[in-house]
Each structure stands twice: as C-alpha cells, then as structure tokens.
Amino acid sequence: MAALQRKTGLGKGLGALLQDEMSVSSASSQKETADLGGAAAGSINFIKVEHIAVNPFQPRTDFDEEALQELSDSIKLQGLIQPITVRQVSKNQYQLISGERRLRASKLAGIVDIPAYVRTANDQQMLEMALIENIQRENLNAIEVALSFQRMIEECNLKQEELGDRVSKNRSTVTNYLRLLKLPPVIQAGIRDGQISMGHARALINVGEVDKQLYVFQEIIDKGLSVRMAEILVRNIQEQLKPKKNQDVGKQLDFQYQKIEDDLASRFSTRVRLNLKNSRGKGAIEIPFDSEDDLSRILELLDW
C-alpha cells in the first residue's frame, strides 16, 4: 500500500482519488487474490508495466502513432489520469482488460509502473468488457465496431437484442454495423481506412451485386461523391435493374449505357435515364427535377 503514496507521474489530486477507491475494496475480493500474492480485486494499485501482458481479446487493431505520441507527451507532463484495468493471472503477472492505448503511451513515456484497477474476470467476461469498452470509444472505426459486435454475438452467445442492451444501441444500429461485414473486403478496407463513411457504406449495402458495389465504391472515391449523391447513384442502378416501360421484360441497357447513366447521375445528383428508341442507338436523355431551384441547379451545371 505504501507505493500508492507516491506522487511522481500522478495528476494533481489523483493520489487522494486512488486512496478513496482503495477504501471500497471488499474483504471477499481481497481473499480471492490473496493466494496470488498480488493486488486485491476491485482495488487500484501501481503495477510495473513489464508485468502486464496485452489483452489477447483486444478488438482494436489500429493505433494512430501521432496521437499515441501526443498522449505519451501528456503523460510525461501530467501523469496518467485514468488508470488502466487488469486482471491478475499469477503472482506479479497481470493481463490487460482495457486501456491498451494508455499502456502503450506510458511505455513510450518511460513510465516504470502504472495505476491500474484490478478485477476478477474469466476469459468470456474479459472479452465482453474489452469489447464494450472499445465499442464506446468515438475513434473506433466502423469495421472494428462491426467485428466487435460479431465477436460478442458469436463468442459471448448474445442475441442482437441482448447485444444492443449491453452497448446501449438499438437493434437496427447493431444490424447496420453487422451488414458492413457482408461487403467485399476492399470496401471494408475503405471503410476502415476512412476512404468512405458509414453513410456511404449503408448505401452500398443496398446494391445487390458485388461488381456494382465495387463500381459505386470507386465512383465515390474518384469523384468525391457525398452520401446523398451515392444514394442517388445506387437508386439509379436499382432502377436500371427493373423492367423498363416500352421494353420487353428482361431487356436492359447494356453496361456501356448503364455507365453513362451512372456518370450523369453523379454529375447532376439526380436520377438520369437514357431512353433508347431503337437498336440504332436513337433515343433521349431524361433528367428529372424536383423544383424550380433544382432545375436552376441543373441548368447551372449545363452552363445554361
């Protein structure tokens, strides 16, 4: 306990906070870990970073190196304000439950020992706590969230409703994240790397065929399409797949004409139709508008 009195590396007033937390540790929790020769479960203690193993269930895979260095510099000046959470696995050996970013930054800062909550948890509890803790972070990308949801369902035996309750999200939100994992790997990587947003991804999910999903994905990147423009492009593609009036059932524009329609839809941010009159290519271009303002916008794009 004497180690808790140290002030080096602690933020102002943190020592008192740690002492307050220590006072709430139960006798039963202390008994559970007494034979391990370490800290009592439920307490906060200073633990050497070399005695802490990384959580094997950590769902987060990407750490911004610049942000990590900034946190490390802050820890050097102010100390680590928020303790990490660990479980004790043997004498003087701990396993990280949550706080890997803080642990990494502390190592960069040259911190020898670190304040940590000590908890008792089995593997499934550890997985669930780590997943929930990471899901609630704002900087976790959508694919990492989706993978975390999937792991909680598969490895923690949760239904979508139960998962929603655990992470304070409704079922439709959980479903939308899980649907991202049905997209082609290259699109998932684009979501992960910030090339497209969650809104773009939700539009892509509505495109049934993989080749068209990839086409729209590339259009979004190449032309910097907004979510609304991507939705219009997707809607245009879906319209093309429906039988057209004055055409035999199953007769559709070939891919060359589809691409022209898609390009025009992207340019004008509205559905564009090529109405072919005969096999010689005669026809008309139809650009619908919703209002006078919408017409003015289209005319400006046409340099009218």
Image (spheres, grey):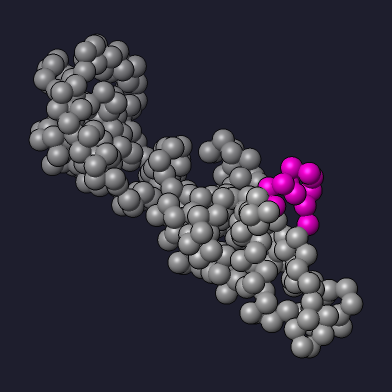
Q: Can residue 2 be seen at all in this image of the molecule? A: no
> As displayed, is residue 229 above or below residue 72?
below
Residue name at image x 33 percent, y 40 percent? 97
**Magenta stretch encompasses residue 188:** no
Q: Residue furthest front?
A: 304
Q: Residue 48: x and y, percent?
A: 13, 35
Closer-to-camera residue (157/290): 290
Q: Residue 238: x and y, percent?
A: 72, 66
Q: Which residue lies furthest to the bottom in this view?
A: 279
Quarter-wise, where is residue 14 in the image?
A: top left
Quarter-wise, where is residue 115 in the image?
A: top left
Closer-to-camera residue (242/69): 242
Residue name at image x 79 percent, y 45 percent? 291
Closer-to-camera residue (229/147): 229
Residue name at image x 61 percent, y 66 percent? 263
The quadrant of the image that shows the C terminus is bottom right
Q: Which residue lies furthest to the right in this view?
A: 246
Quarter-wise, where is residue 12 in the image?
A: top left
Q: Residue 205: x and y, percent?
A: 61, 60
Q: Residue 22: x and y, percent?
A: 28, 18
Does the magenta stretch mainly form a helix, a strand or a loop? helix
> As displayed, is residue 276 above or below residue 188?
below
How many marks the image carries: the answer is: 0
Magenta region: which residues? Answer: 288-299
> As displayed, is residue 129 above or below residue 228?
above
